[in-house]
Image: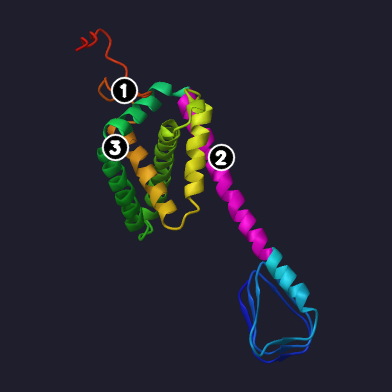
């Protein structure tokens, strides 16, 4: 369960689980690492089949990388399914969120960013005390849930603005495209995390400003997410 450094003379085999092996001495046998890597120093020596140790180390690293990729892919698939469900089951509220994001992007982003940072700080402060720990857990759960809904709304906007005519008004294709863009961006160091934070804050702020889509943005404007006019309101006269 940890790294191992060999500096002396080992008579026999060496086997580790979940840690790297640094060989600066002599091992009169084989070295097997499971989930770790083998580092042979300038004065290190392995009398056994060293290639077998390197093979174990390489396969462990590849397996860990594949597991991380699969976990990230699964999380984005769930995000796509959530966005599709919200778009299908609560279309009016979801489009109200999208309208707020398009009409007041700066205000929505600032509100969402403040809520993310302030909520995270509040949960951290509450977690310091034993009495506040349950409140911190509930607050973190609520913040994570609302942030995920906000990110789902951002995914739909990203998919809608992509310059692909084939997407059209097909919800599934548009959401899949937006999710794919964020998934690909997540692999870019620093900028991927920044893009994810901004997208989450953008959607979360719209969720806050529209009271979870219950308060639509003012009617008017162009685009697929225009809020409907109030019942009885007369349309504007053309210029």
Q: Where, quadrant-wise, is the N terminus in this rendering? A: bottom right
Q: CA distance from mark 1 to mark 3?
A: 15 Å
* Residue 217 % position (x, y): 27, 25
Answer whether residue 103 is magenta in the image. no
Q: Which residue is mark 2?
A: 77
Vertical comparison of 157 with 235: above or below: below
**Span colored in magenta:** 60-88
Q: Is residue 42 left or right of residue 181?
A: right
Q: Which residue is identified by label 3?
A: 105
Q: Earlier in the sequence, mark 1 or mark 3?
A: 3
Instruction: Please identify the dominant SS of the magenta region.
Output: helix
| Residue 143: % across, % down | 38, 44
Q: Which mark is residue 222?
A: 1
Q: CA distance from mark 2 to mark 1?
A: 30 Å
Relative to 24, does residue 75 appear above or below in the rendering?
above
Residue 227 location, quadrant:
top left
1 and 3 marks in contact (CB < 8 Å): no
């Amino acid at each position: 369960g940890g790294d191992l450094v060999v500096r002396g003379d080992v008579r026999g085999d060496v086997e580790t689980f979940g840690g790297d092996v640094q060989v600066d001495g002599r091992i009169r046998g084989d070295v097997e690492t499971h989930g770790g890597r083998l580092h042979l120093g300038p004065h290190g020596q392995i009398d056994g089949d060293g290639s077998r140790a390197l093979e174990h180390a390489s396969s462990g690293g590849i397996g860990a990388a594949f597991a991380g990729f699969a976990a990230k892919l699964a999380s984005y698939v769930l995000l796509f399914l959530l966005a599709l469900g919200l778009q299908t089951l609560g279309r009016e509220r979801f489009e109200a969120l999208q309208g707020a994001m398009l009409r007041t992007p700066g205000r929505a982003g600032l509100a969402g960013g403040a809520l993310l940072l302030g909520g995270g700080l509040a949960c951290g402060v509450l977690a310091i005390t034993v009495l506040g720990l349950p409140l911190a857990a509930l607050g973190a759960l609520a913040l994570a849930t609302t942030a995920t809904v906000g990110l789902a709304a951002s995914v739909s906007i990203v998919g809608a603005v992509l310059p692909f005519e084939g997407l059209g008004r097909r919800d599934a294709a548009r959401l899949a495209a937006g999710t794919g863009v964020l998934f690909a961006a997540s692999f870019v160091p620093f900028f991927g995390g920044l893009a994810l934070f901004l997208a989450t804050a953008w959607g979360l702020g719209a969720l806050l400003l529209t009271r979870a889509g219950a308060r639509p943005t003012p009617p008017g404007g162009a685009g697929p997410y225009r809020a409907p006019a109030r019942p009885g309101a007369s349309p504007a006269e053309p210029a």
